Image (cartoon, helix red, strand yellow):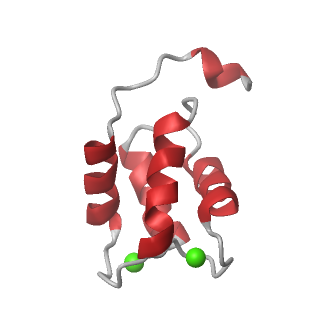
Amino acid sequence: MPVYGTIPKPPLNEKTVKERLKKADINGDGSLSVEELKKVFKEMGSNWPGVRTWLCMRNTDSDGDGEISASEMNKLVVYIMNWADA
Ligand SMILES: [Ca+2]
Ligand SMILES: [Ca+2]
């Protein structure tokens, strides 16, 4: 694990994560863009919002269009809940 893996996890549950992601969809198109996602991680206190966003995109953007669509959102929620803090 990376060095920051030693920081304790914040209390994240599925509901919290989903609510945050829903709020993050600023333009209301139902998908999360890189900028929208980065804002979520900043708000969650991430030290590396850009890295987080990149990792999430790599792992959960199945169709590779650069946005997390509604169908990819569940994968993103699971990914966020299981991550080590950064
Ligand atoms: Ca959006
Ligand atoms: Ca996508």
Number of callouts:
0
- Quarter of the figure with the C terminus: top right
Residue at the image point whose x is 54% and y is 69% from the top: 34
Horizontal side, residue 43 vs residue 64: left or right: left
Q: Identify whether 22 is placed above or below 43.
A: below
Whether residue 54 appears in this view of the structure is yes
Residue 80 versus residue 39: which sits nearer the camera?
80
Quadrant of ligand 1 in image: bottom left
Q: Identify whether 21 is placed above or below 47.
A: below
- Quadrant housing residue 10: top left
Horizontal and vertical percent position of residue 21: 35, 59
Whether residue 32 appears in this view of the structure is no
Horizontal and vertical percent position of residue 18: 31, 54
Q: Identify whether 8 is placed above or below 75.
A: above
Residue at the image point whose x is 33% and y is 26% from the top: 11
Residue 81 versus residue 10: which sits nearer the camera?
81
Horizontal and vertical percent position of residue 63: 66, 78
Horizontal and vertical percent position of residue 44: 38, 41
- Quarter of the figure with the N terminus: top right
Residue 10 versus residue 82: which sits nearer the camera?
82
Residue at the image point whose x is 55% and y is 48% from the top: 49
